[in-house]
């Protein structure tokens, strides 16, 4: 095969561009802890967690607050601390709306992590519900300082279930304590 003038250069440039895209993809989707993903936060400094969840087609939305002294708070922060998150390449496109045809075994949850004075990535201080983790029937989104990222977790099905179990046990304990 005989190469015309410039064909080799275009072929090399195309291959280099493709390799650059692969490298970007590997770096962007690399496993990260929640603290690496949300720079500036430290889970040890989380002051409380507000949560909402729902199981099944007819289940009603349950809301609870986990305080630092609660056993469920320690379990939840442990689950968050040991999880490794991968950003999805879908984040490069607009997220759009979500819908889901409910099945009896489906569930969803939302965690709002509260922090005191925290140095944010832009150098300012922030406090309040700085980190939101929203599991919408298997689609996990993490929001921090105005940016929402779709993510996956290692062993996602089991991890999501462990978070849901922790929330349900905490709600049952809270209901029992109130009676």
Image (spheres, helix red, strand yellow):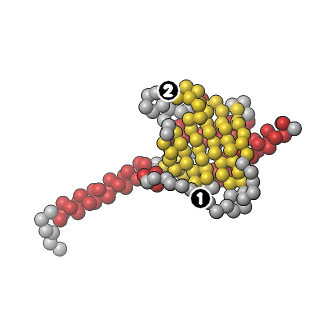
Q: Which mark is in front, 1 or 2?
A: 1
Where residue 1 sits, quadrant-wise, is: bottom left
Q: Which mark is residue 52?
A: none
- Left or right: where does residue 13 sit relative to residue 161? left
As helix, strand or loop, the secondary structure at mark 1 comes to loop
Cβ–Cβ below 8 Å for labels 1 and 2?
no
Is the residue 120 above or below the residue 107 in the image?
above
At x 53%, y 42%, the residue is 143
**Which of these two is toward me, 72 or 130?**
130
- Residue lying furthest front: 97
Q: Position of residue 88 (x, y in %)?
A: 48, 52
Marks counted in the figure total 2
Badge 1 or badge 2: first in the primary sequence: 1
Q: Nearer the viewer, residue 161 or 154?
A: 161
Residue 98 pos. (x, y %): 56, 56
Residue 44 in view in this figure: no
Q: Residue at x 80, y 43 (%)?
A: 172
Residue 96 against residue 76 in the figure, above or below: below
Residue 117, located in which quarter of the rendered image?
Answer: top right
Q: CA distance from mark 1 to mark 2?
A: 35 Å
Where in the figure is residue 145, as x and y percent of width and height? 50, 37
Residue at position x 61%, y 53% in the image: 136
In this rendering, the answer to whether 171 lies above or below 116 is below
Residue at x 61%, y 41% (from the top left corner): 80
Residue 176 visible in the snapshot: yes
Determine crowd level at label 1: few under 14, some 14-19, many 20+ residues with C-alpha closer than 10 A.
few
Question: What is the crowding at mark 2: few (fewer than 14 residues within 10 Å), some, or many (at least 20)?
Answer: few
Q: Which numbered marker is on residue 125?
A: 2
The image shows residue 109 at horizontal and vertical percentages of 65, 48
Q: Nearer the viewer, residue 75 or 93?
A: 93
Q: Residue 99 got which mark?
A: 1
């Amino acid at each position: 095969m005989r190469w015309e003038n410039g064909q080799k250069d275009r072929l090399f440039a195309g291959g280099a561009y493709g390799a650059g895209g692969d490298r970007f993809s590997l770096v962007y989707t690399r496993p990260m802890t929640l603290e690496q993903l949300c720079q500036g936060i430290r889970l040890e400094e989380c002051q409380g967690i507000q949560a909402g969840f729902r199981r099944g087609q007819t289940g009603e939305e349950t809301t609870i607050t986990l305080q630092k002294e609660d056993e469920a708070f320690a379990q939840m922060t442990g689950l968050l601390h040991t999880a490794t998150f991968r950003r999805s390449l879908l984040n490069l496109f607009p997220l759009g709306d979500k819908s889901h045809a409910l099945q009896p075994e489906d569930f969803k949850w939302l965690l709002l992590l509260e922090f005191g004075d925290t140095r944010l990535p832009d150098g300012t201080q922030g406090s309040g519900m700085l980190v939101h983790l929203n599991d919408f029937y298997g689609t996990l989104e993490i929001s921090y300082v105005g940016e929402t990222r779709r993510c996956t977790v290692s062993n996602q099905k089991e991890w999501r279930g462990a978070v849901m179990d922790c929330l349900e046990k905490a709600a049952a304990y809270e209901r029992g304590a109130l009676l």
